[in-house]
Image (cartoon, rainbow, N blue to C red):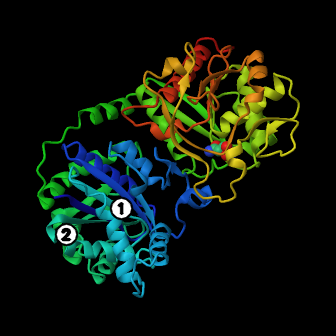
Amino acid sequence: MTKHIFVTGGVVSSLGKGLTSASIGMLLERRGLRIRMQKMDPYINVDPGTMSPYQHGEVYVLDDGSETDLDLGHYERFTNSPLTRDSNYTTGKIYQSVIHKERRGEYLGQTVQVIPHITNEIKRAITKLAEPDVDVVITEIGGTVGDIESLPFLEAIRQLSLDLGRENCLYIHLTLVPYLRAADELKTKPTQHSVGQLRQIGIQPDLLICRTEKPLSRDLRAKVGLFCNVPPECVIEEQDKTFSIYEVPLSLVEHGLDELIVRKLNLKCGALDLESWHELLHRIRNPKNEISIAVVGKYVELRDSYKSIYEALDHAGIALQTVVRIERLHSERVDREGADRLLAGVDGLLVPGGFGERGIEGKIHAIRYAREKGIPFFGICLGMQCAVIEFARNVAGFEHAHSTEFAKDTPHPVICLLDEQRMITDKGGTMRLGAYPAVLLEGSRAAAAYEREISERHRHRYEFNLAYRDALERSGMKVTGTSQDGKLVEIVELPDHPWFLAVQFHPEFKSQPTRPHPLFQAFVAAAVQRRLARTASPQG
Ligand code: GLN
């Protein structure tokens, strides 16, 4: 029978529940268990696809085209558990489904209520993942215990222990034990209160994971245990990791977390195999080079908006034993202050995806600078579209070339909408979304980097306009990847540049720390080359 782990969070948000859940998943997988991971988000949007990065950070796209919470990025980086649209539910998605059923008359005249109809729908979403070949389903409940929004989710997971048997469910609560400098003390009261709230609604957590700046003493763990009604060994410390997030699972193992879970859920499994993870940390701790990559975007002030891109750069750096210092540059600043002032010292430029006109010219200036100075350049989605616009304007001679997303009446719409997108008026879930295969041009950089079949995830409406393909190719920009029918351009390159490659898809979603994405790796390798060449000849 499939077992369930529920991860809740208390005291404050941003405790790293996603990272902790992903670490738990990774540890169980490395004990040979087959797991599934899932996140419940209490907000009312049906998915985060229409939310601003200021509200939500990055929208993480899955193979099946669902637009999900960025915590699913942690799940995919830490585990190999397959994720689908069943891996992320919001209050909106649950209600949408209940309301559809009500309209179809499926409730047979009943009054439709939060309990049992909404909670049943939540339980269905959770148990759906418990297929016969799955040992453990890990469900992370977003939000903080005590929020009004998360109550139906908490009620549903409480009920599940009655439906499935208490012995088949494990409740893990992540809390904060703050350090008060003035008193030089760690404080347990917020944890007591948050567990108190959980117990009030009928959930007794089995394990407490305490985020803390300082180690928890035995006495302190005993105190937390006593007030929260758990044995002291079930109070686990998760100290802040400033060095690398990939240390988190190892520190949880040190405090016995995997063993406790296995014992409490009575799981039959093997010993923990962490060899490749130790190797990963060894590489992280022993870098040989350091480079700097400028990321020029509109949301650089927010750490989470380009989360997967920063992670993917890091993965490539780890593989090449190189520290990748990321210079987050606002595109409007590049526009104001000039690319040469801001980009002169960098070893590579990355322009990520985005929407809307603000900051576009700054991205285009930055790309021009990288193209002219031979700085390795990697464009992603909107980054590719900007590279095409820049090349069309400044090399191929198409004055005022633009994307019709930003200039409806441009004389040269090098990026434009395809007919199937023209008619669409709904915003949610209507872009070209999810994984599609692509065909690569033999002899290109893209073909050299990928040693595997290529299937990459998309999230965009606008496309390279094929009417300009010949003209741009004659001027030196090569199309090196297309959709299988050849109608959609997926990759462009400048073969005469040290490394200039841009893609319409989002490779960052398929990078793992132990398996970096080939294009990110090739880009970082080109940046390392440039750095080494420059240190050898400072004029260069
Ligand atoms: N705004 C562009 C489009 O819709 C690019 C999207 C993106 O970068 N994700 O095509």
Residue 220, horizontal then vertical, whole percent: 23, 67
Q: Going 67% across and 40% down the picture, which residue do you hit? A: 382
Q: Are marks 1 and 2 in contact (CB under 8 Å)?
A: no
Mark 1 and mark 2 lie on one chain; the one further toward the N terminus is 1
Circle 2 SS class: helix
Q: Residue at the location (54% across, 52% down)?
A: 59
Residue 237, quarter of the rendered image: bottom left
Picture quarter with the N terminus: bottom left
Task: For marks 1 and 2, give the CA distance.
Answer: 18 Å
Q: Quadrant of residue 446?
A: top right
Report x, y in % for residue 18.
39, 56
- The numbered mark at residue 140 is 1
468 is higher (above) or lower (below) than 216: above
Secondary structure under tag 1 reads strand
Instruction: Indicate which quadrant contains ligand 1.
Output: top right
Q: Which residue is tagged 2?
A: 164
Examine the rendering and report whether any part of residue 414 can be seen.
yes
- Give the residue displayed 23% in from the left and 47% down from the top: 34
